[in-house]
Image (cartoon, rainbow, N blue to C red):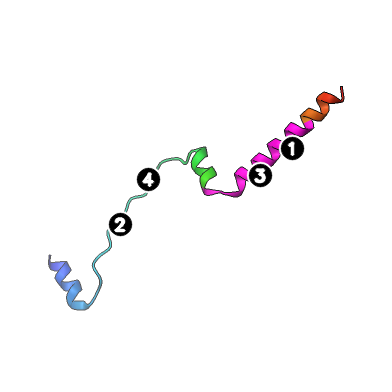
Amino acid sequence: MGEAKRRKELGLPPRAVKKEKKAEKDNIFQKLRRNQILPVVLAIGFMIFLIVDLLRYYNQ
């Protein structure tokens, strides 16, 4: 309590509590949620792949 009273007398705000960062690895789903352009690019690339594959199949 001594430090809290001293900070109050000096006009300082209460001391901030430091939060520890998690050491977890981000999995692929969390990365896709954060990056909004990546799923669009992957979907367009997959559609182009399907169209090219369909054209190759019918040209045989």
Q: Which residue is drawn at 65% across and 40% down?
A: 42
Instruction: Tell me the distance, in whole angstroms, between the alpha carbons under discs 1 and 3.
Output: 11 Å
Residue 39 disc label: none
Query: Considering depth in this image, is 48 or 6 the residue closer to the camera?
Result: 48
Query: Considering depth in this image, is 7 or 32 the residue closer to the camera?
Result: 32
Instruction: Tell me the distance, in whole angstroms, between the alpha carbons under discs 4 and 3.
Output: 30 Å
Say which label, 4 or 3, has the lower sequence index. Answer: 4
User: Would you call the spot at circle 1 few (<14 residues within 10 Å), some (14-19), or many (20 or more)?
Assistant: few
Residue 58: where, in percent of width, then height?
84, 25
Q: Residue furthest front?
A: 58
Say which label, 2 or 3, has the lower sequence index. Answer: 2
Question: Do labels 1 and 3 touch, CB within 8 Å?
Answer: no
Q: What element carries label 4?
A: loop
User: Would you call the spot at circle 2 few (<14 residues within 10 Å), some (14-19), or many (20 or more)?
Assistant: few
Say which label, 2 or 1, has the lower sequence index. Answer: 2
Q: Mark 4 points at which residue?
A: 22
Question: Do labels 2 and 4 touch, CB within 8 Å?
Answer: no
Residue type marked 3: Val
Q: Nearer the viewer, mark 4 or mark 3?
A: 3
Q: Mark 3 points at which residue?
A: 41
Q: Residue at x 28, y 62 (%)?
A: 16
Q: Give yes or no for residue 57 being in the magenta stretch.
A: no
Instruction: Tell me the distance, in whole angstroms, between the alpha carbons under discs 2 and 4.
Output: 13 Å
Q: In which quarter of the image is residue 45?
A: top right
Q: Give the range drawn in magenta.
A: 34-52
Q: Mark 2 points at which residue?
A: 18
Question: Do labels 2 and 1 touch, CB within 8 Å?
Answer: no
Q: Residue at x 52, y 48 (%)?
A: 34
Q: Which residue is drawn at 69% across and 36% down?
A: 46
Residue type marked 2: Lys
Say which label, 1 or 3, has the lower sequence index. Answer: 3
